[in-house]
């Protein structure tokens, strides 16, 4: 689905503070944890901080709108940054995970608000304004905490008020319905079209029909409408349409819905069980060992014997026998 919200609802406060394109807006923001990424709360549901120059351009931003549409004395940051040395954002340094030097976005100089780089003095495609470098020694309006981090501005900047801009928000593309849901609706505009899978089933993210909802681990069945919990004495380790597997002979499991063979516990010493046993009492003492079902089982002493498996005591040998 792709959230069906217009630019008027692109910012969390409900209003797009600056419109650069249908899918790119500026949202005034403030944050007290270091890093541009922490301004993301200003983007409304269905929007996110533009990750890079490439993503902003793909969303419709142009260099002209980036420069012309910004009010004076504002800057709207993306997650784009660079490797340093010179003012150029490189494709190999998109976003906040790969490079932190300098901050790139859209903005315009204003009284007491001078951006570091603009237009032809930098090279970052449709992003025409930059912050960092020699401004690492001073704050720019409400853009602070860069003075000691001349090569990590994107990761360290703190914005102390809504004044002076914020973050550049791009409209998200189509999003997958989450795991455990499905949607068969074309051109869906809301997460509400993602329907929960039936009980005891699960789907991968992006499922498009109820048929993609498979029996969960611990549940067996041949189709989504017939997924039943594995009974005690059985288990199923993966999702899918298959039957539950019986615990092997010599083990038991009293846990229904088991999702691992580890649920099958070994019988007590000197006892054994049939395949699929569901309780320790199914473990019977072996031949030559006496005791109750479930143990403990004790070896028959000299002069005693037990010639069948199961519960019972050892029997003494007949007179004149040994």
Image: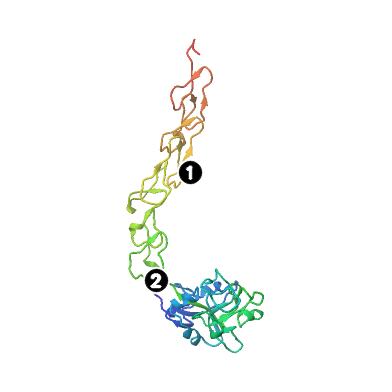
Q: Residue at x 61, y 73 (%)?
A: 152
Q: Quick one: SS at disc 2?
A: loop
Q: Which residue is mark 1?
A: 262
Numbered label attached to residue 150: none
Q: Which tag, 1 or 2, sits closer to the chain's start?
A: 2
Q: Position of residue 138 (x, y in %)?
A: 65, 81
* Residue 294 position (above or below residue 96): above
Residue 90 seen from this side:
yes
Q: Residue at x 51, y 28 (%)?
A: 297
Is disc 1 surrounded by few (<14), some (14 to 19) or many (20+) residues within 10 Å?
A: few
* Residue 109 position (above or below residue 180): below
Residue 178, image quadrant: bottom left
Q: Residue at x 37, y 54 (%)?
A: 214
* Residue 218 position (above or below residue 302): below
Numbered label attached to residue 2: 2
Q: Position of residue 287 (x, y in %)?
A: 46, 25
Q: Quick one: SS at disc 1?
A: helix
Residue 97, image quadrant: bottom right
Q: Residue furthest bottom?
A: 111
Instruction: Report the side of 1 relative to 125 (left or right).
Output: left
Measure how far apart labels 1 and 2 are at the Cα level. Answer: 42 Å
Q: Position of residue 76 (x, y in %)?
A: 53, 80
The image quadrant where one finds the N terminus is bottom left
């Amino acid at each position: 689905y792709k959230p069906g919200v217009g630019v008027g609802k692109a910012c969390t406060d409900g209003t797009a503070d600056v419109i650069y394109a249908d899918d790119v807006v500026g949202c005034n923001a403030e944050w007290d944890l270091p890093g541009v990424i922490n301004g993301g709360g200003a983007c409304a549901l269905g929007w996110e901080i533009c990750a890079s120059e490439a993503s902003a351009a793909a969303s419709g931003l142009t260099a002209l709108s980036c420069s012309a549409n910004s009010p004076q004395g504002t800057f709207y940051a993306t997650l784009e940054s660079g490797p340093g040395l010179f003012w150029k954002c490189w494709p190999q340094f998109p976003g906040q995970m790969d490079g932190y030097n300098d901050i790139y976005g859209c903005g315009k100089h204003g009284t007491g608000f001078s951006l570091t780089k603009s237009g032809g003095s930098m090279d970052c495609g449709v992003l025409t304004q930059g912050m960092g470098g020699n401004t690492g020694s001073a704050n720019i309006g409400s853009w602070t905490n860069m003075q000691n981090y001349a090569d990590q501005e994107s990761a360290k900047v703190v914005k102390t008020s809504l004044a002076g801009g914020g973050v550049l928000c791009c409209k998200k593309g189509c999003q997958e319905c989450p795991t455990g849901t499905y949607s068969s609706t074309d051109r869906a505009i809301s997460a509400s079209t993602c329907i929960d899978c039936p009980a005891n089933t699960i789907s991968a993210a992006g499922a498009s029909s109820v048929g993609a909802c498979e029996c969960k681990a611990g549940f067996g069945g041949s189709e989504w409408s017939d997924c039943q919990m594995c009974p005690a004495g059985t288990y199923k380790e993966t999702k899918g349409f298959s039957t539950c597997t019986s615990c092997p002979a010599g083990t038991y499991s009293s846990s229904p819905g088991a999702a691992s063979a580890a649920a099958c516990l070994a019988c007590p010493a000197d006892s054994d069980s049939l395949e699929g046993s569901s309780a320790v009492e199914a473990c019977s003492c072996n031949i030559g060992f006496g005791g109750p079902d479930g143990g403990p089982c004790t070896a028959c002493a000299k002069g005693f014997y037990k010639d069948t498996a199961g519960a019972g005591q050892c029997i003494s040998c007949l007179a004149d026998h040994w």
